[in-house]
Image (tube, grey):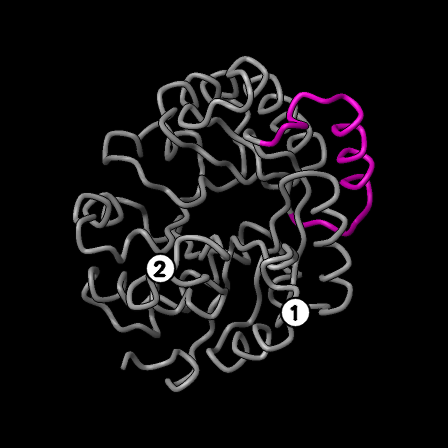
Amino acid sequence: MPESPSKRASAPLIDTHCHLAFDAFDDDREDVMARCHEAGLVGCVAVAVDAASAEAARRLAQAHPGFVHATAGIHPTESVCGDEREWAAVRELLATDAFVAVGETGLDAFHDTVPFEVQTTSLVAHLDLALELELPVILHCRDAFAELAAVLERYRGHPIAGVLHCFTGTEGDLDPLLDAGLHIGLGGIVTFKARADLRAAARRVPAERLLVETDAPWLAPVPRRGRRNEPSYVRYVAERLAEEFEEPFEVLARRTTDNAVALFGERLAS
């Protein structure tokens, strides 16, 4: 029976990407939150995919001040991507001081729910707003790293603070992301036995750019693979990376926590 992360010695961790305000957690959210604290988490970023989920994330952050931190944005596969009224609602939310990042936005060539040109227009709008508001941006990319690199190239000379979350690409895909100044978020997939290539890519991420995440409720790490993911499981991700980097878990935990605070702001350290 795999050991629960709540049974181990505490070390500070921040889950930099989860969807804790989603209805997947409606039945036991407070229990999930308790396990976060037991596992040594000092914060999590509750990421939105549309205006409604941004509002839900804001309410959750208000209920758990200093621990839950909300974002607002429109995911590229959401049907409202490209909807001007939805974007106006997101902009209105981001005009408040309740959010630590813009997004989740990005490009997705795997799903065919939203035309690629609509996704690109939405991505540029998010990037421009992030620069305007001086907030970091959370980026999604699936099967579209070349196209994302082309968009990021437009911002050369205007460095973008942000993170490519749940990175699943190759070592070659990293270069444009790192050149753009982005952090790299690694989640449960890096623990999968077959993804030695992803772990090799992870070794190329500069220490000060590495973040850990869950993307909960999806992509649970080994040894919880196949179950609903939750933020406390970020510990499994950090442990696997510490093993890969041949360094103490506490060192990696502290560094990724410091990186999250540096990117998202001092509110994550409160």
Residue ID at (47%, 73%): 12
Per the image, the residue denoted by label 2 is 226
Residue 195 lies, in percent from the top left, at: 20, 48
Mark 2 neighbour density, 10 Å: few (under 14) some (14–19) many (20 or more): few
Give the quarter of the image for residue 125. top right
Q: Is residue 231 above or below residue 17?
A: below
Residue 161 lies, in percent from the top left, at: 54, 38
Q: Which segment did they paint magenta?
A: 78-100
Mark 1 neighbour density, 10 Å: few (under 14) some (14–19) many (20 or more): few
Which secondary structure, mark 1?
Answer: loop
Of residue 82 and residue 112, the one placed in the foreground of this image is 112
Residue ID at (27%, 58%): 191
Residue 162 lies, in percent from the top left, at: 52, 40
Q: Is residue 106 above or below residue 19?
A: above
Quadrant (top left/top right/bottom left/bottom right) for the N terminus:
bottom left
| Residue 99 inside the magenta-drawn segment | yes
Q: Is residue 114 above or below residue 89?
A: above
Quadrant (top left/top right/bottom left/bottom right) for the C terminus:
bottom right
Residue type at tag 1: Ser
Tell us which disc is closer to us: 2 or 1.
2
Residue type at tag 2: Gly
Give the quarter of the image for residue 181. top left
The residues bearing labels 2 and 1 have C-alpha atoms spaced at a distance of 33 Å
Give the quarter of the image for residue 248. bottom left
Per the image, the residue denoted by label 1 is 270
Which secondary structure, mark 2?
Answer: loop
Residue ID at (30%, 36%): 169
Residue 88 lies, in percent from the top left, at: 80, 28
Is 64 positioned to the left or the right of 10 in the image? right
